[in-house]
Image: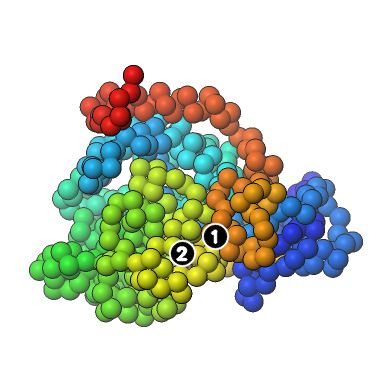
Amino acid sequence: MPAPTLKIDHARYILTLDRQRRIIEDGAILIEGGRFLQVGKAAELAEARADRVIDGRQLVITPGFVNGHMHISYAHPVRGIFPDEQASPLVHVFNLQTAMTEEEEYHATLLGLVELVKNGTVCFLDPGSTKFPDACLQAYEDSGMRVILGECVTDQPAPFTLPRYDAREAVARTSSFIAKWNGRLEGRIRAWAMPFSHETCSPGLLEALKRVADEHGTGLTLHHGSGTKARQDSIARHGYTPTAYLESIGVMGPNVLLAHCLGLDEAEIDSIARTGTAIAMCPVTAAKGGRGVPEHGRMPEFLARGVKIALGCDSPNNSNHLDMVRTMNMAALQYKDARQDTRQVPAEAALEMATRHGAEAMGLGDELGSIEIGKKADLVCFDVLRPEWQSMWNPLNNLVYNADGRSVHTVVIDGRIVVDAYRQSFVEEPRLFAKVQEIGERLQARTGIRFPRSRWPLS
Ligand SMILES: [Zn+2]
């Protein structure tokens, strides 16, 4: 039986993110076999018939959002437990993550998927934090989401609990993980090499993992930052800045995605641009964590050098929301303020990072990131019959500066409707929410990681 066809007719605007960045007013889209078959003015597609037709008169349509750094698996049950004065909760974060059972991780992941997809995300990269991918596979399949997975490995001491192996075993585990997972769920799952960071891995391990990624035609991601102290440490240890060190051992290139990338100097930015390395930045995490964007944030310099940047939400205990619209908003605002210059990170650049450029950064640019004939049919429909979308002069400004994920009305992945007029149908939400709350209680009791629940009297 042929796959059902889908038409969105008379869309108020389609932000195509195609090569010319066309914005089509009164547009139409025809989807067949999970791909865009026609995209144009509604009048041009007047004859096109489909099994289902969505009335787009009150919808603004964008490509699906991609999220380049998203620890999905642990934090929902304990989201919000850390008080603002907890400078870095990382030690607790990794202890909580390590303590999760298979069943707990499945439910936490399911809730993460609900939040992501209902806010318009169609693809995310989990930087190796999922411990039980077999248990989570059903959740990935049910949600219809695209997922880039990997197994977090290290072979050096770390300041917090991370999986540590000898280098040979870490490489073998990564190879077999990729062989087992890459391409599953009709290609919606990709598997990458995921060393935690250059500080927690030996050069031999990093080089070997890059070779594994190259041989499998897949990617490698790791946490990466610089700044005065990290630079001094890296120079003392390796004789190079963190980025120059990675370049010196061959762990850079278009299939490498460096996460966070705060505090890099000019030479490091040049190294990233020259080698075609991609980066993922988490603007809300940076702001909430007081990471000093005015001093350490270099997004405008990366953009000026044409570096492919994906945006990330990091984790439900970092950002803490999983809303790519709010994340675009933060990216567009924080550099205007940090540089006292409204020309920094235009709304257009924010939307490119969340879609086309983000997909390129994640190695998926040929298939995703724009609404173009032949590409995979992933898209988001925003309901503009809401006060925050008024008045409509520049839909792109409205999206990035006025709206948030709550106006996501319909989401399509691979030509399949996964959110239909605000509703997902893969899980019963109230029951899941109660379950995850209960898991949070169990997890805090088991680990002893507890904080005062409120600064104000709570009775
Ligand atoms: Zn991370």
Expressed as whole percent of the image width and height from the top left, the position of residue 276 reads: 40, 75
Expressed as whole percent of the image width and height from the top left, the position of residue 226 reads: 24, 66
Name the element at disc 1: helix
Which quadrant would residue 236 be assigned to in this image? bottom left
The residue that label 2 is drawn on is 332
Nearest to the observer: residue 9 or residue 190: 9
Left or right side of 73 for 398: right
The residue that label 1 is drawn on is 400
Q: Mark 2 belongs to which amino acid? A: Ala
Asked if marks 1 and 2 touch (Cβ < 8 Å), the reply is: yes
Image quarter hosting the C terminus = top left
Left or right side of 307 for 156: left
Which residue occupies 83% across, 52% down? 50
Left or right side of 184 for 152: left
Is the CB atom of the residue marked by disc 2 within 8 angstroms of ligand 1's nearest atom? no
Alpha carbon of mark 1 to alpha carbon of mark 2: how far? 8 Å
Visible in this render: residue 61?
Answer: no
Nearest to the observer: residue 179 or residue 2: 2
Which residue occupies 49% across, 36% down? 111
Name the element at disc 2: helix
